[in-house]
Image: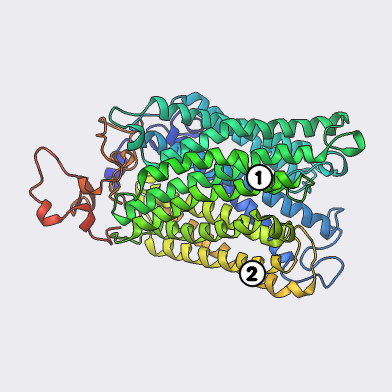
Amino acid sequence: MNSVEKEIHYLNHEKGFKSWFWTLDHKRLGLMYMWAVIAAFVLGGVFAMLVRMELMQPNSLEGGQFLSDQVGGLSAADRYNHFFTLHGAIMVFLVIIPGIPAALGNFALPMMLGAKDVAFPKLNRFSFHLWLTGALFFVGALLWKGLDTGWTFYAPYSTSHSDTSVIMATSGAFILGFSSIFTGLNFLVTIHKLRPEGMTWFRMPLFLWAIYATAVIQILATPVIGIALLMLSVERWLGIGLFDPALGGDPVLFEHLFWFYSHPAVYVMVLPAMGVVSELIANFSRKPIFGYRSIAMSSVAIAIFSFIVWGHHMYVAGQSEVVSVIFSALTFSVAVPSAIKVFNWVATLYKGSIRLNTPMWYALAVIWLFSIGGLTGLFLGTLGTDIHLHDTYFVVAHFHFVMVGSAIFAFIGGIYYWWPKMYGVMYNETYGRLGCFLSWFGFNLTFLPQFVAGTRGMPRRYFDYDPQFASYNMWSTIGAMVLMVGLVIGLFALVHSLIGQRRKAPANPWGASTLDWQCTSPPPPHNFDHAPSVDDPYDHDILRWDEQEQGFMPIDPVDGDPNLAKMGSARTAPATHS
């Protein structure tokens, strides 16, 4: 333990609040993003549990089943509207969109390039401070008048009917948009300009391809939502008719602007998750990723298609039948690059030397959950079935399988994967796996019944419902409780590794071949003491298991390794080393 304390690394080379808050170190900024996102996730989860508790049974009393009536001057129904709105807004704008790109991307991306930092460190710090400012606006909206418009801020309700903190919340989202744009711009330039000699485009780790495609979406799509929210605020402030029909405006215009951003934003959430899963599947299967180029190009294809399918959210908004047919066809086409990724992940698993460490559990969970989310999306992309399923709980379940099942599970899996690199300690695998299983089981129990309820006509966003849907909501709420327990155990496993009996992590506990695992754990302040060697990011045969170090070490290509025959290559290393 004393030797660990004497080592100089990015966590201890400068101490104090100011050294962290004003840091230019991408690793520290990544950690601060991560813990801030986790705090927002806890807050959004509290609102989710309040919603589920209210919906556990149909209301037997006028005041609500769980929420008390007329508390703080609001009826139980009004407070329910506030809770599901704040749950959605916090989860989308403060958790899922910044989760993997801003937190894990900031921590890992420069090291995966062998660089000492991102291209614009000061802009990176400014992006984080903007994120904090936007988050404070959302907290202010919560504490002042709340928010009841739904996370989509649909006009004209948000412009002239709601008396809640719409301006404050949209201002927060506007500021968060700038944070997202600057982060994407920074990553784009970093990948273009800071790749080391020998790392061509098709020798980059797939996580970098995913972050690159995500950055393109962030830069091109986010200004549109900024314009839409600014127009909404101007109408609410000055009474100018932009979206309100009573003032000569068009509410469908807001839908077009909102979904032109928000459907690409789905892939801002999902593409980085796919990048994380690609890293986990390859490394814990001990195989080169199957179809590297097709996975890389599918990330770019998804980014392109994401801009031309927004109209499938608006089949019932009055658009022409021809336009709806076109959007339906485009929606089906975007499923192809997504299916390519799933197929290649499964092909990578085939005959692999699979190690079921905690990150791999989360990767396998993502394959299951994303496949269900993708397949159920086919029903919503089909004109005939979408008319019936639109604004039912089928959409709620589909959305959560794609967003939470893919983005959040991959986010947690990525945290577990890079945790030894972040803090230089190993966590308890039993706690980690138990948290993953309970989260996966609770998630399925929560949302699978909602598919059935939705097909039978249960509408979304309603405070009360017909008693025929009671059993589905009962199981859904029980599942949410199990999910919450799993998430708490997963967080406990990480915190326990820091405050319990700390087990020092080797530099490369997973046997990964990417450059981020060629530095010490935790990394030095500038990531590398020596320039890392660039190899195939998924060639695991360049590593060997070292019993003394209890980690993977590179094979010296010049001097050879006399112990290699005895110790075996990375593919034959012990599966229980962690």
Q: Position of 289 compared to 303: left or right?
A: left
Q: Which residue is mark 2?
A: 449
Q: Which mark is residue 82?
A: none
Q: Residue 30: give x, y in percent of width and height.
A: 47, 38
Q: Residue 434: give x, y in percent of width and height.
A: 45, 66
Compared to 284, does 8 lie above or below? above
Q: Residue 484: give x, y in percent of width and height.
A: 57, 62
**What is the total number of numbered labels drawn onto the structure image?**
2
Compared to 487, does 523 lie above or below? above
Q: CA distance from mark 2 to mark 1?
A: 31 Å
Kind of residue indicated by mark 1: Ile
* Mark 1 residue element: helix
Q: Is residue 544 visible?
A: yes
Kind of residue indicated by mark 2: Pro
Question: Residue at (82%, 60%) from the top-left corner?
Answer: 76
Question: Residue at (38%, 56%) from the top-left corner?
Answer: 427
Q: Position of 290 compared to 437: left or right?
A: left
Question: Residue at (43%, 51%) from the top-left corner?
Answer: 277
Q: Residue 506: give x, y in percent of width and height.
A: 28, 48
* Mark 2 residue element: helix
Q: Which residue is mark 1?
A: 326
